[in-house]
Image (cartoon, rainbow, N blue to C red):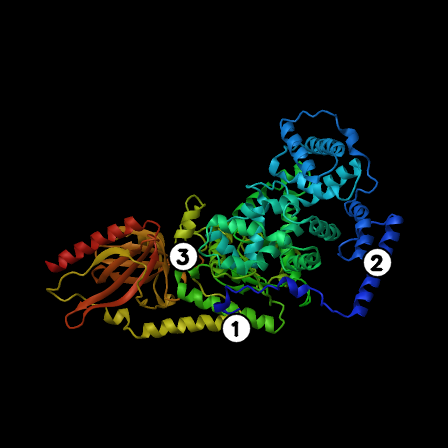
Amino acid sequence: MDEDNQGEVTTPPLNDLSPSISLDENENDETAEDDNVWHIELEVALSEGCDAASVKGITRNRPLPGSMRAAVWQVCLNVAGKADQLNTFDGLYDLPEQSLIREDCQALVDKLGNEEEEKVSVASDLESLVTLYCKSRDLHYEHSSGWLDILQSMLALKYNKADLYNVFYALHTCYVPRDCTKSGKCFHLFRLLLLYHDPELCAFLDTKRVSPDMYAQDWFATLFSSKCDLGVTLNMWDVYLQCADQFLVFFLALVILVNARDQLLIMELASKQEIIDKLSIFPSALEAEDIEDFCSLAIYYSTKTPQSFRQNYQALLFGTSLASMKANAECLELINQSLCLSVSVDELLASNQLALSDGIRYFLVDCRPADQYNAGHLPTAFHLDANLMLQSPAEFSTAVQALLATQQRAISANAAAGGDHLCFMGSGRETEDQYMFMVIAHFLQRRTQYVSTCHGGYEAIHCVLEDDLLIGLAEHQARWCIVCTPSAGLPCNGVDSYGNKIHNNEASLSDKFEKLSTVVKSKSAIVKEKMINYIKNEQGAAQERHVSSEDRMGKRYRNMASVFTIDDDDDKSNDVMITSSSDDDNKPSVDLDTWSKRSDVQFTFDCQAIDHTGQTHVCRLCITATKLFVLREPSERDGTARIHAERPLGSILKITSKKRHPEFITFKYGCNEQDKGLTVTAVDRFIIPRAGEATKCIKQQIMKVLESTDT
């Protein structure tokens, strides 16, 4: 997937799925003969009382002959021979909105142009049906509900009153999404589907503040019957009921938008209302002959979409069970807050078992911290440390290029890990997953197609594979796995896995996005290893161009003004990180608490140091009258520490903090040489939770040292 082509969305036009057209009379005769054959088969099957599966086997998603449409619809909706539900009607027309129902029914009958006597009868029947439907489902009638548009199309099938009610009840309950109002949740889901397949078009509409409910409310509420001619509607519903797919309306709407994308994207200067008006009339251009291709293309898009959303949202959007609606309250929140579609663990794992031509295949991107990735991951997962995006945007960009290159090679090689669909996975815990969402947002901003996230993350995958972890996960280490050993993933010294400060063990959403953290070297495939080595070599080359801090660190020349400053970094600095490397194994080991309580130590601050590779280390800063000591704790944290660095306070040239990340503090060390001026010889970078207090104390000590030197 080339970065320059991220905004290009390739979709088959409507005509791509059209049958070839020939003027050969013999071919037309053969087609007519074939139609006669399946028409006869269908008629025989209906006379024998067939079921929906038998009907579909004969019709194969083709529009139906008008003479058999009414019977086929009853079979497909499973209401053939169903009892007359009007017997349960109490005969009372006492709904609060009864006058509105009566007015709308009369308005519909007036449009039909029947004889006056028939109008009265039809209007009465319609009012009875709508009133009973409201009472049986405890619903309130609204003019925008679209019920009468659906009933108007059904009247063409000449059902008796009882059958008309049963067919309407089944169709509306099973296939019209619940709550198709301006705040209806079906429109949130539809936007996610559009974002998945055509992120460029979705971004355009978002920019124009055009939400799906503004143009598609009638589409969903009436299954397009309010916008399409009767012949188009009947043919469309023929295929709809044969497919028996409740979510097909979403993909029909998606096909309409995608095939009209060129007309929409050129409306950059159009007003919001002009775009809405343009969108709302697109279905009216459909003709009856288009329906087979139209529905076939919708089914195609359905097969190219993660199927997990169906089980997540089915009870929320369809059916009558109030209990299921309450049980799926979490799904409601999921729709509102989702950045993109989510994929269940079962679907993700099953995709790797598919033949290349079956279903969709995912390229899994594991966005967890490297220590979690190294303690267990799916064998096909590509590791992309989410924190690279914050700590080192350049390295993150390089890592993304490596990801896309690896994806293309895996697809070309027909590898199990290959797939056009990107699925991002986090830990399953909010603390780390907020960083994964930033990565997902980055890909969506690049208009990347087919972006999803693994629902539940690593924790959910671990749960599914718990009976066979050694085979299901690569490099699984129970001791460090956050599921097998929960304490392994608990915050240490008030920071999370990314090195960010946590208040009361729960960081706020703004904290998670604002604070910088660690970048650590991860185990991964050879291509990722080469990419990271390349980055490190580049850093090493830059470092070698400077003299070691231990060689260059010296006193300031006399009679030269102090150059020490403490201020904010403007985030635009391109300073090379000059960090004196050291081998901690050769450093003296001390008892951390005892050393921190020495009489000459005036202040101590817990922090995390970031070395030249981007890896973080738990440290403690100890400030004496003249020096700053960096005590680094070992990974096992047994109460000991090594004296990693000993910095004279007089050698500190500058202390800076990031404007957007005030706890990220940089110390620059060096000397002011008479012939060369200011020379930076080393840089230390820390994440200090008490950054304000720490920098104030260190500044005061530095000023005392400078005053003493001047004296």
Relative to 502, say whether 576 is above or below: below
Q: Residue at x 31, y 68 (%)?
A: 576
What secondary structure is marked by label 1?
Answer: helix
Question: Relative to the observer, which residue lies in front, 64 or 47?
Answer: 64
Q: Secondary structure at mark 3?
A: loop
| Label 1 packing within 10 angstroms: few (<14), some (14-19), many (20+) | few
Q: Nearer the viewer, residue 481 or 10?
A: 10
The reply to whether residue 489 is in sight is: yes
Please provide percent x and percent y for residue 230.
Answer: 70, 48
Q: Is residue 251 above or below residue 167?
A: below
Callout 2 amino acid? Trp
Identify which residue, 152 or 615, lies in the foreground. 152
Compared with 532, 190 (above or below) is: above
Q: Earlier in the sequence, mark 1 or mark 3?
A: 3
Examine the image and state in which quarter residue 540 appears: bottom left
**Disc 2, SS:** helix
User: Label 2, label 1: how many angstroms apart (C-alpha)?
Assistant: 57 Å
Left or right: 7 as drawn, with respect to 80: left
Residue 177 is situated, as x and y percent measured from the top left of the image, at: 64, 44
> Around disc 3, counting alpha carbons within 10 Å, would you say few (fewer than 14), some (14 to 19), or many (20 or more)?
many
**Marks 2 and 3: which is nearer the front?**
2
Q: Disc 1 marks which residue? A: 526
* Measured Cα–Cα span from mark 2 to mark 3: 67 Å
Residue 413 placement, left or right of 267: right
Q: Pointer 3: what residue?
A: 517
Q: Position of residue 465 (x, y in %)?
A: 64, 57
**C-alpha distance separating marks 1 and 3:** 26 Å
Amino acid tagged 1: Ile
* Circle 2 residue: 38
